[in-house]
Image (spheres, helix red, strand yellow):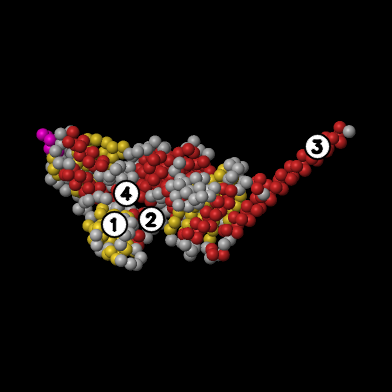
Amino acid sequence: MRKILILFTILLFTSCSSSKLFVESSSYRELKSKINSLFEDTLFSHAHWGVLIKSLNTGETWYSKNSSKMFMPASNQKILTTAAALSVLGPDYKFRTSLGFTEKITDGILEGDLVITSNGDPTISDRFFNSPVDLFNSWADSLNSFGIYEIKGDIIGNDNLFDDERLGNGWSFDFLDAWYAAEIGPLQFNENVIDIRLVEDGDSILAIPNVHSSYFNIVNTVTLTDTGRNSVSYKRAYGTNNIIVSGRLRKGFEAFSVSPSISNPTLYYVSVLKEALEKNGIKVHGNVIDVDDIQGGVWESKRIEILLTHESPELKEILKGLMKRSQNLYAETMTRLLGLEKNGLGTFENGLKVVEDFLKQVGIKPRSYKYSDGSGLTRYNYISPEQIVTILEYMYRSDLKKEWMELFPIAGIDGTLSGRMKGTKAQDNVRAKTGTISAVRGLSGYLSTDEGEEIVFSFLINGHLRSTRETDYITDNVLKIIAEFNRGNY
């Protein structure tokens, strides 16, 4: 009798377990079917989807489509760069900028040159200060406190900690005047752009820069009209700082800004600094000079004494701007900073070695991907959804999880996802990096299901001819389905 009861118990347990497995299998099949129907939308039959959705709790793959194939990632490339920077440099790392001088200071007169050296601090802007020139004004106050009221020599921008390659590999010529393609260098001011606010003033339109300087020239040809669509563009001929803002705006338009990039960030930096010093009562006799323009061995022979040093906010705060706003300049700076800190000079090639070493540690084989810039602006980058998920999993399980998760745009809340997935269970749930270049779209990150199961995902689409809104419709609806998923509802 006892044997019969034991046998009956075993059969009952097995039956219940089998039933549970069947329910789970059925729920996953229905989930996968819903997801698949979205990624198989006929609107995108011409394009290439790469998808991987995976449970962080169990390691199980929920959905996969071309997940090991190579895709251009657009700004999902920033996941690689940011993970390497945070891991190698640490969340508390700070950029350093120094003001030094040559010769001597006598009776309030600095007899030589004022020399500014930095390792790429990107924070001297109104993202971190009330005004981009606040720090320069503070430096003027410091010089006054040292008793310096006159500078006999030049204001020299020492940008030798990075090389002189100001553009990313493969960047297209037709967008180099845009803010998102700002030139790269160790001396950065106002994110190497000029923000021009267009404001209605009676029967005309004012173009007001957020920084006033003789370093650039703005030509405003925008007209005010009674009817018609608003349409404004800007152009800056390559190698110049003559900015033409043109187009038409209808009366009653809401003021907005355009942000063209500036040529030669080093000269931009020291030009505005010189003007700030002079406005604060410090007379400067010399010129502004990019150290690269000093001939021969003159520069090498100069002895520099440091007057003061400025430190940036912590890296973890700067990386929030990189990821949430998808700031290309920050990303390119990180790659070169890695090269400087680990290999002695801020070049892309030196930074690439550091990124490759980090990715090897993560578990991604060398030469199984293409890392051609730090930001994703080039079309030469290639990586798979599987590799992106590998990085995301690694960082999720690392000691830096807290700092890492705080960097991502949050659906319906902030960054490049602030306007997406609002009013759904994906809002304030999805944390993901967006990516967009022509015919390329990406979205990779994390979310949790209605039951609290943690999910990691990567969606990449290449070669699409549809609108950004239509690609977002697909990815956002997939994430909404996952956020609502609860086995008890199936």
In the rendered structure, find residue 169 and report the number of the disc placed on it. Answer: 2
Describe residue 158's horizontal placement relative to residue 426 as left or right. left
Residue 407 on the magenta segment: no
Q: CA distance from mark 2 to mark 4?
A: 19 Å
User: Mark 1 vs mark 4: which is more N-terminal?
Assistant: 4
User: Mark 4 vs mark 3: which is more N-terminal?
Assistant: 3
Residue under circle 3?
A: 9
Residue 368 visible? The answer is no
Q: CA distance from mark 3 to mark 1?
A: 78 Å
Q: Provide the secondary structure element on which disc 1 rests.
A: strand
Describe residue 347's horizontal placement relative to residue 403 as left or right. left
Q: Provide the secondary structure element on which disc 2 rests.
A: loop
In the rendered structure, find residue 198 and report the number of the disc placed on it. Answer: 1
Give the extent of the magenta segment.
Answer: 104-110
Give the quarter of the image for residue 152.
Answer: top left
User: Mark 3 vs mark 2: which is more N-terminal?
Assistant: 3
Picture coordinates of residue 279, whole percent (x, y): 17, 44
- For the point 77% across and 39% down, which residue is it? 13
Dot 4 amino acid type: Glu
Q: CA distance from mark 1 to mark 2?
A: 33 Å
Judged by depth in the image, the label closer to the viewer, 1 or 2, is: 1
Residue 83 visible? The answer is yes
Q: CA distance from mark 3 to mark 2?
A: 67 Å
Judged by depth in the image, the label closer to the viewer, 2 or 4, is: 4
Judged by depth in the image, the label closer to the viewer, 4 or 3, is: 3
